[in-house]
Image (spheres, rainbow, N blue to C red):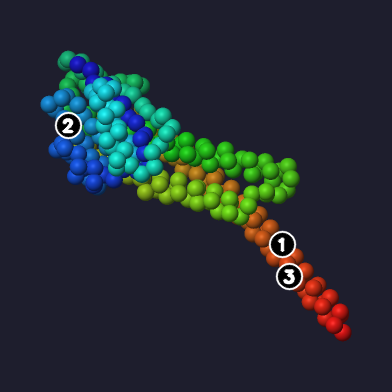
């Protein structure tokens, strides 16, 4: 037996509460931030996360497409980056232990809890890729201004555009901070040694923790650049105000001389 799994980054945010209320299926497990469905009558499994990721198991292209259109009704800001990841679960009779490989995991038997752990890690991996793309865009845009400082000793960016850039950076960082729980282990692994080992091996396979540390490091670089840009802008604004004051004083002196 083989189960095909695919995770997709569809939006930046899902309204899980509203979705659960209107989706006509009973959840196997869930919370305010995620929900997992074991649709055993069709041998399909579905995992939806509030950070905009959906993970499908055993869904054909038509059913997958139909669900994507449905879930978009509960989405905030659709992500159009084609971010996805595929994985497989393969059953091997009389297998003594779970084997985790780059593109599949071999198990003796499949149950809903095991599927949930695999789908969770694939979902985390896609979410991290989304944040990696956003952070790379921020670093790339900041390089232009750094190069301008090096070549011309000044920034041509306006105060309004700089504030927009700062807002974008803070929005990305806040989104990541809000979703730090994506690295948390689900409760079901705490009392199950086999699932706990599977979860740890999958995290290693998808480089979940190293990727998050690298993401945090790159965001720190962007924040340092922001501090630099803000300081340059403040100096520029201060200089402009000084010139305005000088001009006003000069005008006042000229007027005083003229009338006397």
Above/below status of 14 relative to 232: above
Q: Quadrant of the N terminus?
A: top left
Under circle 2, the secondary element is strand
Which quarter of the rendered picture does the C terminus lie within?
A: bottom right
The alpha-carbon separation of the residues under discs 2 and 1 comes to: 64 Å
Measuring 50% from the left and 47% from the top, which residue is drawn there?
A: 169
Q: Is residue 61 left or right of residue 160?
A: left
CA neighbours of label 2 inside 10 A, class few (<14), some (14 to 19), many (20+): many
Residue 143 image point, x, y percent: 61, 40
User: Does dot 3 land on a helix, a strand or a loop?
Assistant: helix
Q: Left or right of 225: which side holds 188? A: left
Location of mark 1 (residue): 239
**In the orientation shown, which residue stands out farthest toward the left?**
41
**Label 3 Cα neighbours within 10 Å, binned few <14 / some 14-19 / many ≥20:** few
Mark closer to the chain start, 2 or 1:
2
- Mark closest to the chain's N terminus, 2 or 3: 2
The answer, for residue 69, to whether it is visible in the render is yes
Residue depicted at x 21% and y 36%: 36
| In-front residue for pair 156/233 | 156
* Res 245 label: 3
Relative to 119, 43 lies left or right = left
Is the residue under label 3 in contact with that under label 2 (CB below 8 Å)? no
Q: Residues within 10 Å of mark 1 (few under 14, many from 20)?
A: few
The image shows residue 124 at horizontal and vertical percentages of: 34, 35
Numbered badge on residue 38: 2
* Residue at image point 28% right, 22% down: 61
């Amino acid at each position: 037996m083989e189960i095909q799994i695919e995770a997709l980054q569809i939006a930046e945010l899902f309204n899980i509460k509203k979705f659960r209320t209107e989706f006509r299926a009973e959840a196997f497990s869930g919370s305010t931030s995620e929900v997992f469905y074991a649709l055993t009558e069709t041998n399909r499994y579905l995992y939806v996360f509030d950070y905009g990721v959906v993970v499908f198991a055993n869904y054909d292209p038509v059913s997958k497409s139909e669900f994507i259109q449905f879930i978009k009704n509960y989405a905030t800001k659709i992500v159009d980056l084609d971010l996805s990841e595929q994985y497989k679960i393969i059953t091997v009779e009389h297998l003594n232990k779970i084997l985790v490989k780059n593109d599949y995991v071999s198990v003796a038997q499949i149950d809903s809890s095991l599927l949930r752990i695999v789908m969770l890690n694939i979902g985390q991996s896609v979410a991290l890729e989304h944040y990696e793309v956003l952070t790379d865009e921020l670093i790339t845009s900041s390089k232009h201004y750094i190069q301008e400082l090096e070549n011309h000793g000044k920034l041509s960016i306006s105060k309004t555009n700089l504030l927009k850039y700062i807002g974008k950076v803070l929005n990305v960082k806040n989104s990541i901070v809000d979703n730090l729980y994506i690295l948390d282990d689900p409760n079901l692994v705490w009392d199950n040694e086999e699932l706990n080992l599977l979860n740890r091996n999958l995290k290693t396979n998808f480089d979940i923790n190293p990727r998050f540390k690298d993401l945090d490091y790159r965001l720190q670089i962007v924040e340092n650049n922001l501090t630099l840009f803000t300081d340059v802008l403040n100096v520029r604004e201060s200089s402009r105000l000084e010139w305005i004051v000088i001009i006003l004083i000069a005008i006042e002196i000229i007027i005083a001389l003229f009338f006397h």
